[in-house]
Amino acid sequence: MTSLELFSALQANPISNFIGHQNHLFGAVAQLFHITGLILVLTSVLVVSLRLLGLGLVRQTVPQLVQATSRFVWVGIALLTVSGLVIFLPAAAHYDPNPIFWLKFELLALALVLHVTLYRKVTQSEEAPRPIVAKGTAFLALSLWFGIAFAGRFIGFY
């Protein structure tokens, strides 16, 4: 089964049809939840990454910042997932030929892998990581998450 066939089947299911036949405000609310989720993730990653770069909140340790922000990251990802499905399902087949859509999900996969591996290891250690590792991880995390945001914004223009 090709991705277009899969996406067409997803678009034709009853849940997608239900969502697609809702008032346009339903879609607008889904977009607001999507943006809210993105803001929660981006601000949390930004705060911790700036600390890793030595550019702010130096009175708190990195693990303290992670503890304070990690809940927002996972709530944001949950909001992004649910609202993203609500946005995607009614028009799934239209997304298949869009290379920016696929770029967004490639970046998302990389960001999630980074977040649960290297980023977690660097940010949960009580002893400070080597500066090159900390800064490299922060730069990579910021690049991936902001890349996802920009790709998401530009899906509609391609």
Image: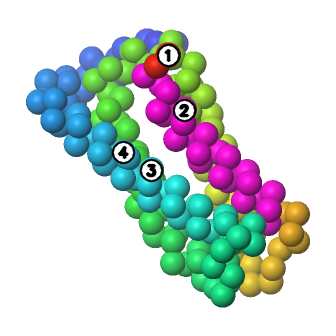
In this rendering, the answer to whether 152 lies above or below 120 is above
Q: Amino acid at mark 4?
A: His
Work out whether mark 1 precedes mark 4 in sequence or the reverse, and give the earlier one. Answer: 4
Residue carrying label 1 = 158
For marks 2 and 3, give the CA distance.
12 Å
Label 1 vs 3, first from the N-terminus? 3
* Disc 1 to disc 3, C-alpha distance: 21 Å
Q: Amino acid at mark 3?
A: Leu
Q: Amino acid at mark 2?
A: Ala
- Residue span colored magenta: 134-156
Residue that label 2 marks: 151
Q: Residues within 10 Å of mark 1 (few under 14, many from 20)?
A: few
- Quadrant in which residue 95 is drawn: top left
Q: Secondary structure at mark 2?
A: helix
User: Could you tell me if residue 1 is visible in this image?
Assistant: no
Label whose residue precedes the other's in the sequence (2 or 1): 2
Question: How many numbered discs?
Answer: 4
At horizontal 36% and vertical 53% (from top left) the residue drawn is 36
In the rendered structure, are the residues bearing label 2 and label 1 in contact, judged by CB atoms less than 8 Å apart? Answer: no
- Residue extending farthest left: 23
Q: Amino acid at mark 1?
A: Tyr
Q: Could you tell me how far apart the alpha carbons at marks 3 and 4 are, in whole angstroms?
A: 6 Å
Q: Which residue is mark 3?
A: 38
Numbered circle sitting on residue 124: none
Q: Are marks 3 and 4 in contact (CB under 8 Å)?
A: yes
Residue furthest bottom as drawn: 59
Residue identified by numbered label 4: 34
Comes first in the chain, label 2 or label 3: 3
Its colouring scheme is: rainbow
Q: Earlier in the sequence, mark 4 or mark 2?
A: 4
Q: Residue at x 67, y 66 (%)?
A: 50
Q: Main secondary structure of the magenta part?
A: helix
